[in-house]
Amino acid sequence: MPGTLYTVATPIGNLEDITLRALRILREVDLIACEDTRHTRKLLSHYGIAKPLISYHEHNERERAAQLISKLESGIDIALVSDAGTPLVSDPGYRLVREAIERDIAVVPIPGPSALIAALAASGLATDEFLFAGFLPSKKSARRARLAELAAIKSTLIFYEAPHRIKETLADALEALGNRECVIARELTKLHEEFTRGRLNEIELNERAMRGEIVLLIAPPDEDMVEQAEASATTIREEVEQLMRDEGLDQKAALKRVARSRRMSKSAAYKLFLEERAADDLE
Ligand code: SAM
């Protein structure tokens, strides 16, 4: 019989945040695979658990996964933990879990803390739909492009962010997403836990706010932001023609309505309308 692979969530700061089941599994397995053996040893010794540890991190994932799979196939039970929170969530483990599943090895989750869920639960932002986007790219151009891709999504956006990049990320988010509500959840479950809330252009970060571990949450776009984005995605000509069709307005009245909704003058709207029509006729 092959062994079982347990993915075990561990605390994200406060050592009390570990489930009874997680402690039992860590006591029962034959081997614990972890990112940093010194870090995990501290957690285990706090709970009086002595177990063989083996490192499994982003730099040895490939070879280690193969070794761990053969141990599992020989009947050894393994717990996979990361330095903090739920393994595989912006942490190593994906390769190992995929390979275990391919070989019919049981993979059993032992749920517990994850920074994104803890942050969301106290953020005060919409929780019915959210998108966890992990870490944004560190390069500015790639980060802006990623944020632009996410602009149309009507859910709360959640990111992990490094403290030295948070200021730049807020500025890029303001530009790409508009002035949305946001929350910076810092040092969750630790002594200096802190939530900073406000619009993207209002957040002021002092020295302390740029230290420690951070989850950034950004609210979905407001109704009028969505309307504006939708309006700029349709041409004036399309909108005018739609009003003529749907509401029986003549062209002049339709243009007047569109100009008002786009907060532009009638003459500017008419000019754009003619340009769009000329461009469409050329196609
Ligand atoms: N697997 C972890 C989880 O389930 O949350 C995440 C690991 S990821 C490598 C580390 C990132 O998670 C940090 O850079 C930070 O963005 C976030 N994080 C972890 N612990 C946190 C905490 N106590 N407070 C705020 N953010 C935290």
Image (cartoon, grey):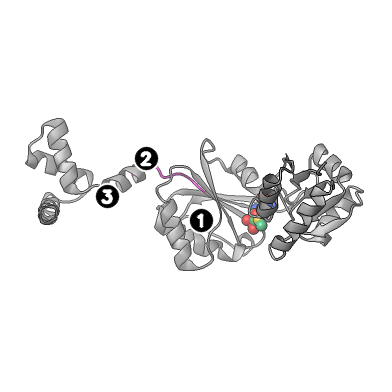
CA gap between label 2 and label 3 equals: 14 Å
Residue 245's place in the image compared with 5, above or below, is above
Q: Write down the residue under mark 1.
A: 203
The residue located at (75%, 48%) in the rendering is 11
Q: Quadrant of residue 110?
A: top right
Which of the two residues, 107 or 91, is positioned nearer the viewer here? 107
Residue 221 on the magenta segment: yes
Q: Write down the residue under mark 2.
A: 223
CA gap between label 1 and label 3 equals: 28 Å
CB at disc 3 and ligand 1 closer than 8 Å: no
Residue 68: % across, % down? 78, 55
SS label for mark 1: loop
Residue 272 is left or right of residue 38, and the answer is: left
SS label for mark 3: helix
Residue 100 on the magenta segment: no
CA gap between label 2 and label 1 equals: 22 Å
Mark 1 vs 3: CB contact within 8 A? no
Locate the C terminus by quadrant: bottom left
Nearer the observer, disc 2 or disc 3? Answer: 3
Q: Write down the residue under mark 3.
A: 232
